[in-house]
Amino acid sequence: MHNTAKYLGYAGLLPFVSIPILIMIGLVDAYLGYVSFVQYSAIILSFFGGIHWLDALQNRRKNHQLFVSMLPSIVAWLALIFLDGTMLLSVLSISYVGILLYDKYVLALEKDILVDYMTMRILLTTVVVLSHLFMAYN
């Protein structure tokens, strides 16, 4: 996997880490920080569906993968509309874990790329879930 992809993946953690810290030290209003956090989370969750959309198209799959590729966007959107507080944070967090597991069993990447990708995704998802937990309890 290209280093640029890794750097961009890790850079994507900046809002997940910085927003809770900015709220904690009082530089950002708690409500405004929460709204910014869940909106960013929903956008990033939607991004993971695109990986499966591309994988399904490139590998000419006509199975569930193309349909499942739409779920992160739909779940994120519906969660933003109908949920709030810890329920919204929980649904987003669980969705990250769910798409990570789906990635592990469905993506058809070359073995060396898949190992690098999954290693990075596990780390990224761990930080994202911990950030959601922090937001839920502060």
Image: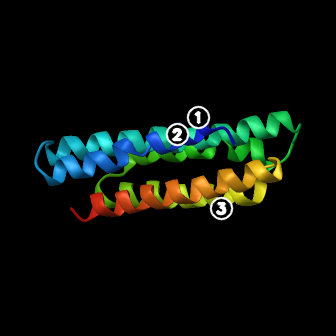
The colouring scheme, among rainbow, by chain, secondary structure or one colour, is rainbow
| Among the 4 quarters of the image, the one containing residue 32 | top left
Q: CA distance from mark 1 to mark 3?
A: 24 Å
Q: CA distance from mark 3 to mark 2?
A: 22 Å
- Tell me the crowding category of disc 3: few under 14, some 14 to 19, or many 20 or more residues within 10 angstroms, Cα based: few
**Which quarter shows the C terminus?**
bottom left
Number of the label disc, if any, that sits on residue 36: none
- Tell me the crowding category of disc 1: few under 14, some 14 to 19, or many 20 or more residues within 10 angstroms, Cα based: few
Q: Nearer the viewer, residue 38 or 24?
A: 24
Q: Is residue 73 visible?
A: no
Q: Earlier in the sequence, mark 3 or mark 2?
A: 2
Query: Which element is circle 2 on?
Result: helix
Q: Is residue 70 left or right of residue 76?
A: right
Q: CA distance from mark 2 to mark 1?
A: 5 Å
Total labels: the figure holds 3
Q: Is residue 109 left or right of residue 2?
A: right
Q: Position of residue 29 (x, y in %)?
A: 13, 43
**Residue at figure coordinates x 57%, y 42% from the top left:** 6
Residue pointed to by mark 1 = 4
Query: Which element is circle 3 on?
Result: helix
Amino acid at dot 3:
Leu
Whether tag 2 and tag 1 are in contact, CB under 8 A, the answer is: yes
Amino acid at dot 1:
Thr
Which residue sits furthest left?
26
Q: Is residue 47 left or right of residue 128?
A: right
Amino acid at dot 2:
Tyr
**Which quarter shows the N terminus?**
top right
**Residue at figure coordinates x 16%, y 54% from the top left:** 24
Q: Earlier in the sequence, mark 1 or mark 3?
A: 1
Residue pointed to by mark 3 = 101
Number of the label disc, if any, that sits on residue 7: 2
